[in-house]
Amino acid sequence: MTSELVAVIDCGTNTTRLLITDGSGVDIRVQKITGLGRGVGASRRLTEDGIKRVSDTLCEFRELIEHHKVQSVRAVGTSAVRDALNQDAFIDAASEALNAKVEIISGEFEAKYSFLGATADLDPSNGPYLVVDIGGGSTEFAYGTNEPLAWRSVDMGAVRYTEQYLGSDPPRPEELGAAIQVARLHLDDIDREQPQIGRASQLIGVAGTVTSIAAVELGLQDYKREMVDKFLLKRSAAEDVFRTLATESLEDRLHNPGLDPKRAGVIVGGCCILVAVMRHWEIDECLVRERDLLDGLADEMLDANQASEDG
């Protein structure tokens, strides 16, 4: 593997994230909850405040990238940017802030690279795997062993479901039931059109909803990535965390060890999706991964750099 550093940025619906890596395992990872997608489900427009929050974060990331003299940079926008009518305004502002082009990727592209990132260091004999990436605006599903063989992106996410279904504080039982039922209808569609997705040997969960549920279950006062990565989250534990968070007011939810206070407002929407997935396909456990889309993209960039050096 080449020792040249690469940087990957994900401008997500809820979080903006940076990975700087040379593939050796000594990485720089920074993330900020920037809430780019707040309200986009209803208005289909990104707010000026949301664009500014992300742009300000990208200016900080740019300083880190320049400090570490990173030459290869890739930045992507996902669900909220895909949905927005004013996506060009965001791309212009974000690209200027970063001094690198921000590209919009499809949900299918996101699913494939989340799979590659999450499974790169796993034993293929334990597959086939189903990688589920619960984001703020969409959820990606990818099935395969060494590489994704089937994938799907669905418009259900932690922010989207919170805004569409969970209007009360705490959410009413009928609101929670509606969110889970709509999620299961999407899963019914997957069963009809891509039935292999639901037949994996191992469920893998990536992104903030799943890692937050794991951290709450572990009771982490201070988030420890090494404890969350490869944690085996039992379905019973996921259900317990869901019940706890869903029955608390937002004010009370803020005090759960392991839960970032800035994620507390949307975590129940994400929980609805994970619980729906595990119930629908009768999955007893979920392998939690800290490797995801960023890692899949970084691995490809590192491989390309190595091939260029070898060539």
Image (tube, grey):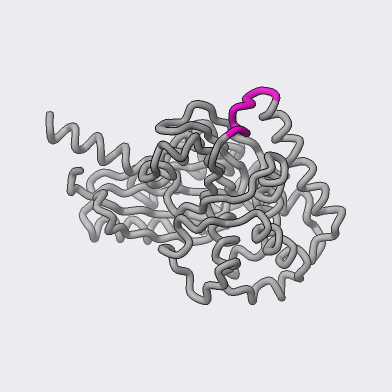
Span colored in magenta: 192-199
Q: Quadrant of the N terminus?
A: top left
Magenta segment includes 294: no
**Measured along the vertical axis of the image, is residue 177 above or below residue 222?**
above
Is residue 266 shown to the viewer in this render?
A: no
Is residue 148 shown left or right of residue 300?
right
Q: Main secondary structure of the magenta part?
A: helix
Find residue 79 and report its horizontal and vertical position in percent.
57, 41
Tell which of 117 and 4 is nearer to you: 117
Is residue 6 shown left or right of residue 108?
left
Residue in the picture at 18% in, 48% down: 3
Residue in the picture at 36% in, 47% down: 8
Is residue 70 shown left or right of residue 237?
left
Magenta segment includes 198: yes
Find residue 259 and report its horizontal and vertical position in percent.
58, 68
Residue in the picture at 80% in, 57% down: 167
Tell which of 22 and 221 is nearer to you: 221
Find residue 29 and report its horizontal and vertical position in percent.
37, 59
Tell which of 304 and 84 is nearer to you: 304
**Measured along the vertical axis of the image, is residue 193 above or below residue 44?**
above
Is residue 281 shown left or right of residue 181?
left
